[in-house]
Amino acid sequence: MRLPELRIGQLVAKVPIIQGGMAVRLSTARLAAAVAEQGGIGLIAASGMTFDELRQEIRLARSLTKGIIGINIMVAARQFANIVKTAIDEGIDLIVPGAGFSRDVFALGKASGTPIVPISSWVKGAKIAETLGAAAVIVEGKEAGGHLGTDQPMSTILPKIKAAVKIPVIAAGGIITGKDIAEAIKLGADGVQMGTRFAASEESNAAPALKEFYLKAKPEDVVHIQSPVGLPGQAIKNPFAAKIIEGTVEPPVSCDACLKHCSRNFCIIKALIRAQQGDIENGLVFTGEYIHKIDEILSVKEIFTRLLREVEDIQI
């Protein structure tokens, strides 16, 4: 099987793979640039970053590749609009808003000519996004890591959204192997987004202890927690996740007001930072449903090599 190019507005990715934007600071410039260098689209996870930090990450990525670089940012973030404006000022190639829906972001994209590619898990949301000017839509199923917008599998949602819109549709959730990519393309996807596979890469900014934790995960270790942003989140069960589920997690003693709305049952930014830094006992470890399929940490180049080889071996 031969993979098609992925066209989003004027952007053309030779390989139709978008690397998911994983916060906090898992997908930074090094990972995004490595993916872009292989012909895919690399995303810097902007959630939890300061404006100056984001500028530095975008500039570093630009110094490492001439490929396509975008950002992912939670709509739930209080500084959402200013983060988007900062990225646009730095000439970012595209914006991927997630964990919520924003109408205003489309005006920012239109004014600057920056493609807006929202994440949606439902037909109505995708159709509204197209009407507002989305350049493409990422269709995320229940298999995805992090915040979830549905309890339905990607394979159920994607064909419905594909039939409802004319913009490119990108499959996300549960895509780990070349076979997974091929199956998504057969369902009608114009490309795929992969997060978990790249979280467990050499270029991922996760601490070594976190990467080793990924490799030990079993299917039964994947659980749902209730995030302070008001959405369920998919994570690997550890002592911290167990406390969230049991309702015994200690609420934050101070608050930076980083979210527009927050239940304050725990501080999600600090919990994600602890995990990224290697504290797997007290951090929140977001993951996709099929983390158990990953049994080794590979370079981005090797991941692409294997994925493309697996796709080429598939007969259609």
Image: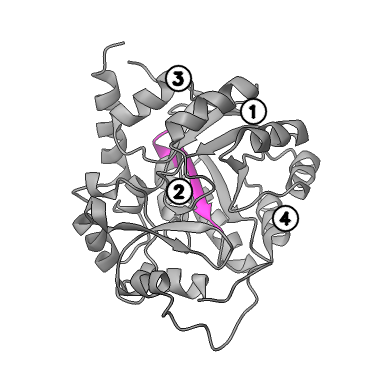
Asked where in the image residue 218 lies, by quadrant, the reply is bottom left
The residue lying at 49 percent from left, 64 percent from top is: 226
Q: Where is residue 199 in the image (x, y as percent from the top left)?
A: 35, 53
| Disc assigned to residue 32 | 2
Q: Which colour scheme is used?
A: one colour
Q: Name which of mark 3 and mark 4 comes first in the sequence.
A: 3
Task: Say few, some or many: other residues with alpha carbon within 10 Å of mark 3 (under 14 / 14 to 19 / 20 or more).
Answer: few
Q: Of helix, strand and loop, which one carries label 3?
A: loop
Residue nearest the observer in this picture, 268 or 156: 156
Q: Name which of mark 2 and mark 4 comes first in the sequence.
A: 2
Amino acid on which the number 2 mark rests in the picture = Ala
Q: Mark 4 points at which residue?
A: 85
The residue lying at 58 percent from left, 87 percent from top is: 254
The residue lying at 34 percent from left, 71 percent from top is: 242
Task: Say few, some or many: other residues with alpha carbon within 10 Å of mark 2 (under 14 / 14 to 19 / 20 or more).
Answer: many
Asked where in the image residue 212 lies, by quadrant, the reply is bottom left
Q: Name which of mark 3 and mark 2 comes first in the sequence.
A: 3
Q: Distance between the residues labelled 1 and 4?
A: 20 Å
What span is in magenta? 36-46
Q: How far apart are marks 3 and 4 (CA)?
A: 31 Å
Q: State whether residue 277 appears in this view.
A: no
Classify the position of the N terminus by image quarter: top left
Q: Name the residue under label 3.
A: 4
Task: Say few, some or many: other residues with alpha carbon within 10 Å of mark 1 (under 14 / 14 to 19 / 20 or more).
Answer: few
Query: In this image, 265 relative to 316: left or right?
Result: right
Q: Name the residue under label 1.
A: 10
Q: Where is residue 183 in the image (x, y as percent from the top left)?
A: 36, 24
Mark 2 in CB contact with mark 1 (< 8 angstroms): no
Q: Name which of mark 2 and mark 1 comes first in the sequence.
A: 1
